């Protein structure tokens, strides 16, 4: 894709990074629920609503989850920096 406006390109990048964060979070969730948190996950009744925070995933010992959590944090920081430095409205 060719861009002729720098700020439009930055806005698109911020949107892509935001989508990437959502996808990474979903990947982390699925990996944890099928791995380290699988036994706990089996005890939850269908229809139960549980609010997850990053703390749950940060506490996981699974190295793969930790790598993805660090990537997610880095992506969030990068997105925030781009938005703040360039005064973008996401």
Image (cartoon, helix red, strand yellow):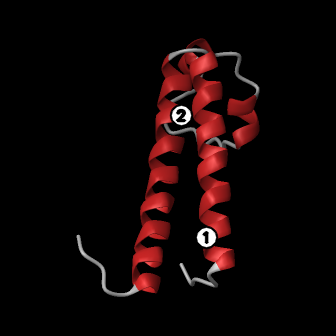
**Image position of 86 with respect to 17: above or below:** below
Q: Earlier in the sequence, mark 2 or mark 1?
A: 2
Q: Position of residue 14 (x, y in %)?
A: 50, 68
Nearer to us in this view, 83 or 65: 83
Residue at left 54%, top 34%?
A: 29
Q: Residues within 10 Å of mark 2 (few under 14, many from 20)?
A: some
Task: Reply above or below: 38 against 79.
Answer: above
**Observer-nearest residue: 89 or 78?**
78
Q: At 76% across and 26% down in the image, what residue appears?
A: 59
Q: Residue under circle 2?
A: 29
Relative to residue 28, is residue 11 depicted above or below?
below
User: Tag 1: Cα neighbours inside 10 Å, few (<14), some, or many (≥20)?
Assistant: some
Image position of 30 (left or right of 85): left
Classify mark 1: helix, strand or loop: helix
Q: Position of residue 38 (x, y in %)?
A: 55, 16
89 or 87, which lies in front?
Answer: 87
Between 47 and 53, the one lying in front of the other is 53
Please state if 61 lies on the left or on the right of 83 as rendered: right
Q: Give the number of the disc on residue 82.
A: 1
Q: Residue at x 63, y 36 (%)?
A: 69
Task: Give the quarter of the image for residue 63.
Answer: top right
Seen in the image, is 31 located left or right of residue 74? left
Q: For marks 2 and 1, give the one nearer the viewer.
A: 1
Q: Residue at x 67, y 67 (%)?
A: 81
Q: Is residue 26 left or right of residue 54?
A: left
How far apart are the alpha carbons under marks 2 and 1?
26 Å
């Amino acid at each position: 894709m060719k861009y002729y406006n720098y700020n439009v390109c930055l806005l698109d990048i911020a949107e892509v990074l935001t989508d990437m964060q959502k996808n990474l979070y979903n990947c982390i969730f699925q990996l944890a629920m099928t791995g380290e948190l699988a036994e706990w996950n089996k005890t939850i009744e269908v229809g139960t609503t549980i609010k997850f925070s990053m703390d749950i995933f940060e506490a996981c010992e699974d190295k793969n989850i930790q790598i993805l959590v660090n990537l997610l944090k880095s992506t969030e920081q990068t997105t925030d920096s781009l938005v703040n430095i360039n005064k973008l409205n996401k």
